[in-house]
Amino acid sequence: CAAVSAWLLGDIREAQAAFDDAVRRFPAEPRVRADYARFLRMMLNKGEVDGKRVLKPETVAEMTRNQTGDLKAAFTDCM
């Protein structure tokens, strides 16, 4: 939740630190963690990773906007 809140508020450094922490605690094999970290870097960079455009910035914006309104989900308490 801290990462999402920081990211949505535009505090990239705080969001990066929170995502780094999430990746460290991600219960998976090292290769999966590395892929997950790369995906998160791509999302933080609005669709670009390692100098390559993977998604349009508009696509990332659509993926990260609140699409459920005030609906509370059991898997998150921060939205």
Image: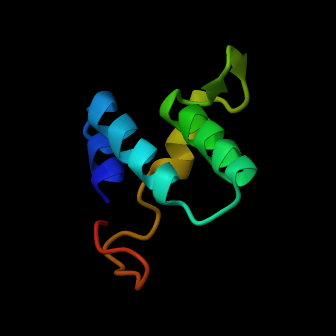
Residue 59 is left or right of residue 79, and the answer is right
Examine the rendered structure and indicate whether residue 77 appears above or below residue 65.
below
**Residue 28, image x, y percentages:** 65, 63
Q: Is residue 62 visible in this depiction of the protein? A: yes
Residue visible at 59% across and 42% down? Answer: 37
Residue visible at 28% across and 50% down? Answer: 5
Q: Nearer the viewer, residue 52 or 18?
A: 18
Q: Nearer the viewer, residue 64 or 32?
A: 32
**Residue 22, image x, y percentages:** 44, 54
Q: Single out the residue that lies furthest toward the bottom.
A: 74
Examine the rendered structure and indicate whether residue 55 appears above or below residue 6.
above
What is the count of numbered marks? 0
Q: Is residue 10 visible in this depiction of the protein? A: no
Q: Quadrant of residue 68?
A: bottom left
> Considering the image in quadrants, where does the C terminus appear?
bottom left
> Considering the image in quadrants, where does the N terminus appear?
bottom left
Residue visible at 28% across and 53% down? Answer: 2
